[in-house]
């Protein structure tokens, strides 16, 4: 029997604000334990919550970016449960009147080849609501301690419809959602810092069946790759269980990304009764058109929109756009460099950024904003190569030194004598003849139809020219002489 998986995700995104959602105490990460607290966070008697408008701005902006319906009025509810991470023994959240309903996340599935665009589809959302984050339990060998620094940080819960069917779709969903939040300045979405957390609900059913199977919730998925791997593991586990004649039990499972294994945490016989009721200390929020219009004007161009524009206006191939657009800083770097380089040079600029800049950044473990080589440097190098002032092989050396020093390409070329002064045609032809005469084996292979054998001659020619021969001219000269030999 063939089976189909059905996947829904619940994603928690910490909103980037200076202070917490219901108090002026600072929000942050990496501080000494229990230093970002105050009477509101610790639920001391008489402490009352006060709404942080920046958190409301963020969720409304997120809803606008994702095409959600923004509620004209939303209220705050108390979600009751008893656990050490919540001093109040309830969490301020939104129950029946969330800020955002509907909307969708656009995703791209892998294409038939890595350099080919895949299928685009939109994964519908159920809702986005705002709530306060809770504290963090730190487990030791003999005790568990609570750090309330995270408690009270504004947190969005983004709930998808059960509309994904593969682990790759879930991976693409989170990748796209994360980029949207970062582009919008809503969150940094650093999973290592707990700024983006995801639970996956997974079930399987016979192909063609419309009713949902019994779902299993997968928790502790602390990287986007682990989300993909954990879902793939759970789908295989459920199918294998059914094929053995077993029954899938509704439960919560823990997935270990290091071992690739999961284990049951607890059964879920019924839904939790959180005894929601409206928070009496917080007034409902009204969102008028002027508020939405102000935030809509701040909404940026999103990655897929940018990718389509780069392809249309700059004629960039998918191999470049699919890399450039997912890091906003990198996309901005490209646009500045392409503008400075001038018309018709965008693809050359993109090639330098994707192939050379990213290689050097990766080796140095730097972000694009930390690079000494600036967009103006890349633009100038492209112009020098196009003008023939610097040859392509010399430009590679110049770029590496630009990255290390921040010098201009003109200065490096002048100091190191890398400005093009190619040999005349007579010298080049002599070097080509010498290279052919010195390698009878490569000559025979080329004559026998092995076109790549020509590369054996190019190295000696470039060495004789001290790197200043035009590679295209070397290739055409060699082919002419080989054809005549």
Image: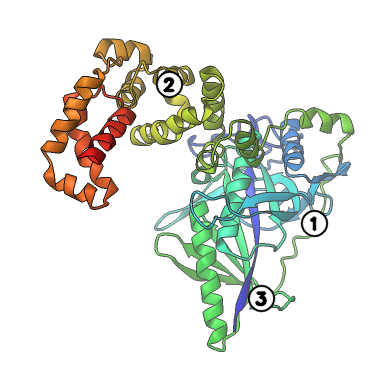
- Left of 71 or right of it: where is 40? left
Report x, y in % for residue 230: 51, 63
Front position in the image: 329 or 73? 329
The answer to whether residue 369 is above or below residue 92 is above
Q: Quarter of the image holding residue 366?
A: top left
The residue lying toward the viewer, choosing from 75 and 302, is 302
Residue 124 in the figure: left or right of residue 116: right
Q: Mark 1 or mark 2, which is nearer the start of the sequence?
A: 1
Instruction: Name which quarter of the figure residue 353 lies in.
Output: top left
Q: Residues within 10 Å of mark 1 (few under 14, many from 20)?
A: some
- Which of labels 2 and 3 is toward the front? 2
CA gap, disc 1 and disc 3: 26 Å
Q: Residue at x 59, y 55 (%)?
A: 109
Contact (Cβ within 8 Å) of mark 2 with mark 3: no
Q: Residue 276 bears which disc, if any?
A: 1
- Residue linked to disc 2: 386
* Mark 1 vs 3: CB contact within 8 A: no
Q: CA distance from mark 2 to mark 3?
A: 62 Å
Q: Say which label, 2 or 3, has the lower sequence index.
A: 3
Quadrant location of the C terminus in the rendered image: top left
Can residue 418 be seen at all in this image of the molecule? yes
Residue 438 horizontal/vertical position (percent): 10, 38
Of circles 1 and 3, which is in front?
A: 3
In this rendered view, identify the residue nearer to me: 339 or 28. Answer: 339
**Colouring scheme, one of rainbow, by chain, secondary structure, one colour:** rainbow
Q: Residue at x 61, y 72 (%)?
A: 251
Q: Which mark is residue 214?
A: 3
Which element type, helix, strand or loop, lies under badge 3?
loop
Which is in the foreground here, disc 2 or disc 1? Answer: 2
C-alpha distance separating marks 2 and 1 = 67 Å
């Amino acid at each position: 029997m063939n089976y189909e998986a059905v996947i829904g995700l619940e994603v928690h995104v910490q909103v980037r604000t200076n202070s917490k959602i219901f108090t002026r105490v600072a929000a942050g990460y990496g501080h000494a334990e229990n230093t970002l607290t105050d009477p509101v966070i610790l639920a001391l008697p008489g402490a009352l919550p006060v709404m942080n408008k920046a958190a409301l701005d963020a969720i409304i902006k997120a809803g606008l970016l994702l095409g959600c319906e923004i509620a004209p009025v939303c209220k705050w509810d108390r979600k009751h449960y008893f656990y050490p991470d919540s001093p109040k023994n309830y969490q301020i959240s939104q129950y029946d009147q969330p800020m955002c309903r509907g909307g969708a996340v656009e995703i791209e599935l892998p294409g038939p080849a890595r350099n080919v665009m895949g299928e685009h589809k939109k994964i519908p959302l159920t809702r986005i609501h705002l709530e306060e984050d809770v504290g963090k339990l730190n487990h030791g060998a003999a005790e568990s301690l609570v750090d309330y620094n995270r408690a009270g940080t504004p947190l969005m819960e983004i709930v998808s419809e059960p509309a994904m069917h593969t682990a790759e779709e879930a991976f693409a969903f989170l990748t796209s959602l994360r980029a949207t939040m970062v582009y919008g300045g809503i969150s940094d979405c650093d999973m290592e810092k707990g700024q983006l957390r995801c639970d996956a609900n997974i079930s399987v059913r016979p192909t063609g069946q419309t009713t949902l199977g019994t779902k299993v919730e997968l928790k502790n998925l602390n990287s986007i790759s682990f989300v993909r791997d954990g879902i793939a593991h759970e789908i295989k586990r459920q199918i294998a269980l059914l094929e053995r004649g077993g029954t899938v039990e509704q439960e919560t499972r823990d997935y270990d990304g290091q071992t690739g294994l999961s284990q049951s945490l607890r059964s879920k016989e019924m839904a939790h009764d959180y005894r929601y009721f409206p928070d009496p200390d917080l007034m409902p929020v009204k969102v008028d058109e002027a508020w939405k219009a102000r935030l809509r004007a701040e909404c940026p161009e999103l990655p897929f929109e940018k990718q389509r524009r780069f392809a249309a206006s700059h004629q960039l191939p998918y191999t470049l756009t699919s890399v450039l657009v997912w890091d906003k800083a990198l996309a901005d770097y490209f646009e500045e460099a392409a503008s400075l380089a001038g018309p018709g040079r965008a693809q050359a600029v993109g090639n330098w950024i994707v192939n050379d800049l990213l290689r050097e950044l990766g080796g140095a473990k730097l972000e694009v904003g930390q690079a000494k080589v600036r967009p103006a440097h890349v633009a100038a190098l492209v112009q020098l190569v196009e003008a023939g002032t610097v040859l392509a092989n010399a430009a590679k050396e110049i770029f590496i030194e630009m990255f290390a020093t921040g010098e201009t390409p003109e200065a490096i070329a002048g100091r190191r004598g890398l400005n093009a002064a190619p040999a005349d045609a007579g010298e080049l032809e002599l070097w080509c003849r010498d290279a052919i005469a010195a390698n009878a084996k490569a000559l025979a292979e080329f004559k026998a139809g092995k076109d790549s054998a020509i590369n054996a001659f190019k190295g000696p020619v470039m060495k004789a020219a001290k790197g200043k021969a035009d590679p295209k001219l070397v290739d055409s000269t060699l082919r002419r002489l080989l054809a005549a030999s």
